[in-house]
Image: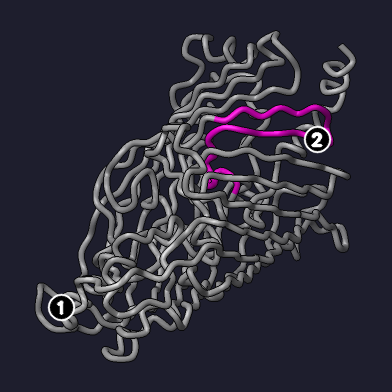
Amino acid sequence: MNMKHNIRLNSTSLRLLSSVVLMGLGSTANALGPVEVPEAWGGDLSSRERLTGDWGGVRDKMSKKGVVLDADMLLMPGGVVTGGKDTGAEFWGNVDYTLNLDTDKMGLWPGGFFKFEGVSSFGNTLYDQVGAVVPTNVASLYPSFNEASSGLMQASYTQFFSPQFGITMGKMNLLEFTPTEFYGNYHTQFMNTAMNIPISLAMVPISAYGGGVMVLPTPDITLMALALDASGTPSENDIGKAFDDGVTLVSAANVKIKPFGLVGHQSVTGVWSDKNRFSLDQDPDNLKRALLQEKYPILGNPGPLLERILAKHFPQLLIPVEAANKKDSTWSVVYSFDQYFWQPDGDSKRGIGLFFSFGATDGNPNPIQYSYLMGIGGKGAFSGRPHDSFGVGWARTQFSDQFVPLLRERLGIGLDHEDAIEMYYTAAITPWLNLSPNLQVIDSGLNKDTSNGSGLQDINTAVKASLRMNILF
């Protein structure tokens, strides 16, 4: 009884606690805790929060009873205007459907939250045309990389015992934790994977079974630690297989600061895993096996692309003659900050600011040595457009010098670093519809590739233009 009364009295603190930290990025919205709902779902077409409205009043009644059912659609037509491996246009889309349950509002017990999320993707991506190693559309990473599919991203239960402490367990969608003030929300902000997630975290699973704790010593300090199935994927739902290949531990700390009254965040994240992985230091005869079998969840799957070059120019190395070298652990660490340098008086959610992130890894088995990310972002910067946002950013992915040295030294295919510059403007047409023109300039880490089975061809700097439509049903 006292617990229920305490949590209700501290609903503001509870929302702060639910804004947990992962990967050095502050989660916003409803990653694990209470879902914000409007006073009413209805209204005319231009003012309602979601396209389908209040469902004849049923949606309002459900949300008041702690049941929130939503569907969001991302439509992303785009094309390579110049450079890359090939020019052309494609269309990619994702549909996210979520069910959130609040046990307190349901009349069961206080502080409990269930979340279920499924995703379906459709269309074709521009991954092959661009020729970049890092995917230029983070939404193409899931449920299956670069192919249309469906999967269960999240099925989790979170329990807050007080405004300062909570636990979570189940299947986690790690992309739910990435939004920050100016990057990480791929629905309305940047699209490039390196502009959403520090690529140093390439070994962290996107969706995996696990559990962890959240601690909020003060309203401005958030701590979190998670233990995740090291081989988790959106398509793997057999909980009996969880942790068979090892564990990935993620710990993070986020501090909210307000220099001169302007909102900012500082965060540090550490990742360690004991999964047995292919070492980057291999006898050349084992290169094919390492490239085709090792997966990098956040980096996508560059193995087949590099294996094609190996098959063309070193066919004698396709049959392994000895056991592959393995690594039994990997680590990475990331520091990030965002800081407004201008905000309208009395409005902590609008303004213009800077962001920066730097990550470092062991460089083996992680194919990334360092990652960099920086830029300028804005939210509601124009008084007449309070819900619009914009951003201009640069990201560099520095590859490990142990990543396929044979191909780098013998064929000069690059793989030293990859740069991406991206800019976008998101216009809020209605509360349920956003349109975002997006432009990316990518200097691929891979400067040569095979073409139609012939010799190596140069990969030039690619310019990719896209239009993203985000529809809330």
10 Å neighbourhood of mark 2: few (<14), some, or many (≥20)? some
Residue 331: tell me if it is visible: yes
Depth order, front residue of 244/446: 244
- Report the mark closest to the observer, 1 or 2: 1
> What percent of the width, then of the height, locates residue 127?
29, 62
The residue singled out by tag 1 in the image is 315
Depth order, front residue of 441/297: 297
The image shows a total of numbered marks equal to 2
Tell me if residue 164 is in the magenta stretch.
Answer: yes
Q: Residue at x 39, y 57 (%)?
A: 137
SS for dot 1: helix
Q: Marks 1 and 2, Cα distance to the nearest angstrom?
A: 57 Å
Tell me if residue 84 is in the magenta stretch.
Answer: no
10 Å neighbourhood of mark 1: few (<14), some, or many (≥20)? few
Tag of residue 165? 2
Above or below residue 62? Residue 409 is below
Kind of residue sitting beneath label 1? Pro
> What percent of the width, then of the height, locates residue 257?
83, 57
- For the view shown, which residue lies furthest in the front direction? 322
Residue 382: tell me if it is visible: no
Above or below residue 232? Residue 472 is above
